[in-house]
Image (spheres, rainbow, N blue to C red):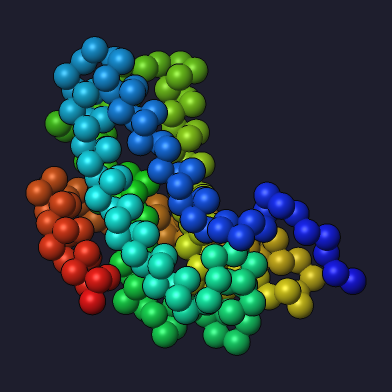
């Protein structure tokens, strides 16, 4: 039997909608750093905003490349396209750049310059405690899970429609990718800020445009 259409979960431009909504976190980060009335928080917020905007350019270009390959903007179409072969196999350079860019976009190590304890105490959330501090970290980790889920949908074929538990398979893949995030955090030292910006503007952007 055919599943009924759900307007919110299967929009015509669902991938672009998710990318646009995720970009709104920049305003909360900048506002929290500015409202703290602390130079450490403001520097951390400015770093986070510059980093997020820079890497979103690369993410959007890689996303456009995958949309050209799948032929549609809907999430369901990515699933259909990858029934035979995952997109990560023919487009592994794009997948690698997407993974590194998603690490930087979510402020994870080795790109956690916005909350560098040795320089900025705790970054843009230095003046917050208790409930607001917990909400900041909940939003940060929710963003990580969302980015990992999008990565799975785009490059690793969210789940075959023929399997009995497609949602469970998607969740397991996203959890595995989150574990790789933690492994990288434990393995690599933090980048310098100029290296971080050179990586995206002088390496990733020319490669994705090419």
**What residue do we see at 56% from left, 58% from top?**
13
Q: Quadrant of the C terminus?
A: bottom left
Q: Position of residue 84 (x, y in %)?
A: 60, 87
Q: Position of residue 170 (x, y in %)?
A: 62, 63
Number of numbered discs visible in the structure rendering: 0
Q: Determine whether, in the image, residue 125 is placed left or right of residue 2.
A: left
Q: In the picture shown, does residue 10 fall above or below 51?
A: below
Q: Quadrant of the N terminus?
A: bottom right
Q: Position of residue 182 (x, y in %)?
A: 40, 52
**What residue do we see at 78% from left, 59% from top?**
5
Q: In the picture shown, does residue 77 fall above or below 42?
A: below
Q: Determine whether, in the image, residue 62 is placed left or right of residue 143.
A: left
Q: Residue furthest left?
A: 194
Residue 25 in which image quadrant = top left
Q: Is residue 52 visible?
A: yes
**What residue do we see at 16% from left, 58% from top?**
201
**What residue do we see at 46% from left, 51% from top?**
19
Q: Determine whether, in the image, residue 145 is placed left or right of residue 63.
A: right
Q: Is residue 186 visible?
A: no
Q: Nearer the viewer, residue 58 or 134?
A: 58
Q: Residue furthest front?
A: 12
Q: Residue furthest right?
A: 1
Q: Nearer the viewer, residue 176 or 81?
A: 81
Q: Determine whether, in the image, residue 11 is placed left or right of residue 47.
A: right
Q: Position of residue 122 (x, y in %)?
A: 27, 27
């Amino acid at each position: 039997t055919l599943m009924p259409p759900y307007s919110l979960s299967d929009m015509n431009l669902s991938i672009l909608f998710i990318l646009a909504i995720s970009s709104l976190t920049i305003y909360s980060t900048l506002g929290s750093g500015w409202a703290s009335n602390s130079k450490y928080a403001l520097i951390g917020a400015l770093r986070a905003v510059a980093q997020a905007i820079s890497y979103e350019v690369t993410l959007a270009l890689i996303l456009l490349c995958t949309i050209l390959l799948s032929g549609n903007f809907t999430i369901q179409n990515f699933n259909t396209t990858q029934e035979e072969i995952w997109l990560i196999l023919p487009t592994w350079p794009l997948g690698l750049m997407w993974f590194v860019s998603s690490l930087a976009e979510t402020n994870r190590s080795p790109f956690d310059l916005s909350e560098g304890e040795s320089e900025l105490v705790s970054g843009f959330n230095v003046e917050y405690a208790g409930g607001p501090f917990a909400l900041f970290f909940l939003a940060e980790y929710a963003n990580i899970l969302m980015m990992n889920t999008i990565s799975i949908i785009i490059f690793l074929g969210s789940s075959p429609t023929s399997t009995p538990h497609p949602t469970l398979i998607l969740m397991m893949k996203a959890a595995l990718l989150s574990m790789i995030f933690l492994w990288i955090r434990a393995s690599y030292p933090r980048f310098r800020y100029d290296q971080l910006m050179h990586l995206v503007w002088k390496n990733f952007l020319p490669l994705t445009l090419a």
